[in-house]
Image (spheres, rainbow, N blue to C red):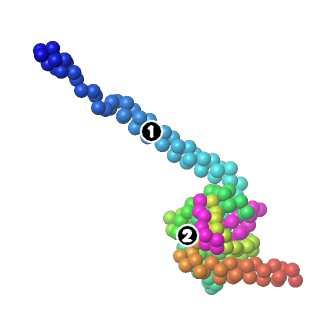
Amino acid sequence: MTPVILLAAQKESAEVTDWAARIGWVVGLGLFVALVYWLMREGWKWRGTLQSDLPELPTVPDDLGPARLSMSGRYHGSTTAGQWLDRIVAHGLGTRSRVRLTLTDAGLDVVRPGASDFFVPAGALREAVLGKGIAGKVLTEGGLLLVTWEHGGKLIDSGFRSDHAAEHTQWVDTINSMINKRETEGAR
């Protein structure tokens, strides 16, 4: 019986965790995630550099005149017109934010808390439609107000979503009637 006791006394329990390997994996994963975020940030900055030919955005005129329409909601970004995945990031146009839109005879005033405001002159407005998607946001059909405007010889689609989506149709009708009126008066 003595040999059995000696055999049992010589056994050791296996090590449960290899802490050095585990810490190495966690540090490696953390570095990989940091690298991916850094590359995404550099890609965003590079896109802005590629779009640097876009001139500065127009400023709000001193006298906007009376508001035709006003709404609060979200600004979801701007893209090259007709290419809903080609986001424009130059001059802060790629930054999603809350928005306060005001349409006047002078144009469209876009006020964004926490992001740079911009103004679209009435002469630059080209079309307004109800859409379902823009880079980074896809909604149900008609859930997004898309305003097409021209800036620096480039057509731009900007996507907005009102806090009250039922307002979108009125915005589309009013903007398009302003454009049609301007084109009719210009043809005379």
Position of residue 176 relative to residue 87, above or below, is below
Residue closer to the observer: 118 or 80: 80
The span shown in magenta is 136-158
Assess disc 2: are there few (<14), some (14-19) or many (≥20) residues with their C-alpha within 10 Å of its C-alpha.
some
Residue closer to the observer: 16 or 148: 16
Give the labeled residue for mark 1. 29
Q: Which image quarter is the C terminus in?
A: bottom right
Looking at the picture, which amino acid does disc 1 mark?
Leu
Q: At 24% from the left edge and 26% from the top edge, which residue is drawn?
A: 13
Quadrant of residue 181 within the rendered picture: bottom right
Residue 72 shows in the view: no
Quadrant of residue 117 within the rendered picture: bottom right
Residue 44 placed where, x, y %?
59, 50
Q: Earlier in the sequence, mark 2 or mark 1?
A: 1
Residue 169 shows in the view: yes
Q: At 37% from the left edge and 30% from the top edge, which residue is drawn?
A: 21
Give the labeled residue for mark 2. 74
- Tell me: 148 left or right of 109: right
Assess disc 1: are there few (<14), some (14-19) or many (≥20) residues with their C-alpha within 10 Å of its C-alpha.
few
Q: Under tag 2, what secondary structure?
A: strand
Count the labels in the image: 2
Q: Is residue 149 magenta?
A: yes
Q: At 55% from the left edge and 69% from the top edge, which residue is drawn?
A: 74
- Tell me: 23 left or right of 170: left
